[in-house]
Image (cartoon, rainbow, N blue to C red):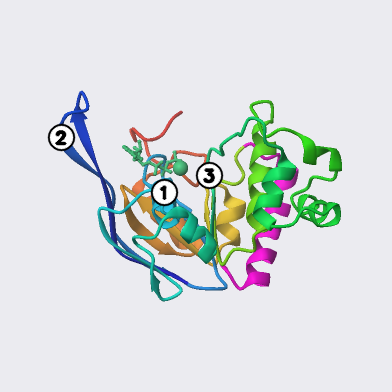
Amino acid sequence: MIELQNLSFEVHETNNGSDTIAVRSIISDISFTFESGKIYAVTGPNGSGKSTLAKLIMGIHAPSRGMIRFMDEDITGMAIDERSRAGIAYGFQHPARFKGTTFRDLLAIASGQDDEDTLARIISRVGICSMDFLDKPVDAKLSGGEIKKIEMATIIARNPKLAIYDEPDTGIDLWTIQPMVDLIRRENRKNNATTIVVSHNRAFLEAADTLLLIKDGKIAYTGDMDGAESMLDDQGVCTLNDLCREENNAECYR
Ligand SMILES: Nc1ncnc2c1ncn2[C@@H]1O[C@H](COP(=O)(O)OP(=O)(O)OP(=O)(O)O)[C@@H](O)[C@H]1O
Ligand SMILES: [Mg+2]
């Protein structure tokens, strides 16, 4: 389980990189406990702070205030690699591409194994059935969906205790989304892990045990999908529904 206590993240906006002209709050005093064995969906409008929250948990950003405890240990000051060894894995919203590296290299590093059978089993779980794919370079030529599948494979290969997926369905074809949801569920159950999925996709939101709605860097709602929808309807935010519910809402496009 992972516990966030009064977590805040601020950035200092500067004038030509020198004097601070304003302090902008991106994550504001978030407290929440993610339990083991559960799947959490984190959703909310673009720019509300979801990826920033995920990066704070992974240690990519250091919080301005607050504490993060993972399995009863204070990890607030822990570096990314230590968090990774402790069992936290994060899949970027926009995964990096590594020139000169193949999918085989990434999987071998993630799983600690390099035999063909193991690697074949891992890639088949993310819907890749061709062994030829293993020797593809992880470079700019990969499609958007392929790179997301590769990243998901490197996460499941590690059997993390906390898996964080940032918009795993970006670029993923319609036929693969539900199998991806099912895979995340199976993996979470198998490892008795905690899974946090940042998503705008209904399939992921419905699969979660608890949904967190982030708005302006704060948790605006926690609960189930029905409650979230009625709350969004009240506020006229068109994040979950394609249709805009309110006239004159600047956040909605027509
Ligand atoms: N290191 C940073 N420095 C300055 N601003 C930042 C930094 N990181 C994030 N932001 C800003 O904080 C806000 C929240 O960003 P974040 O990426 O967390 O949004 P998000 O909820 O994941 O959005 P989306 O749904 O579009 O992925 C954005 O306005 C972003 O520009
Ligand atoms: Mg994001």
Instruction: Between residue 242 and residue 91, name the one nearer to us.
Output: 91
**Residue at 57% across, 73% down:** 37
State which region is magenta. Answer: 171-193
**Marks 1 and 3: which is nearer the front?**
1
Give the side of residue 186 with respect to residue 212, left or right.
right
- The image position of residue 51, as x and y in percent, is 43, 46
Under circle 2, the secondary element is strand
Under circle 3, the secondary element is loop
Give the side of residue 41 with respect to residue 142, left or right.
left
> Which image quadrant for residue 190?
bottom right
What amino acid is labelled 3 in the image? Phe
**Residue at 43% across, 30% down:** 253
Under circle 1, the secondary element is loop
- The image position of residue 144, as x and y in percent, is 64, 33
Label 2 sits on residue: 20
**Which numbered tag is attached to residue 210?**
none
What amino acid is labelled 1 in the image? Ile
Q: Earlier in the sequence, mark 2 or mark 1?
A: 2
What amino acid is labelled 2 in the image? Thr
Rendered position, 190 above or below 113: below
- The image position of residue 98, as x and y in percent, is 61, 34
Residues packed near mark 2 inside 10 Å, few (<14), some (14 to 19) or many (20 plus): few
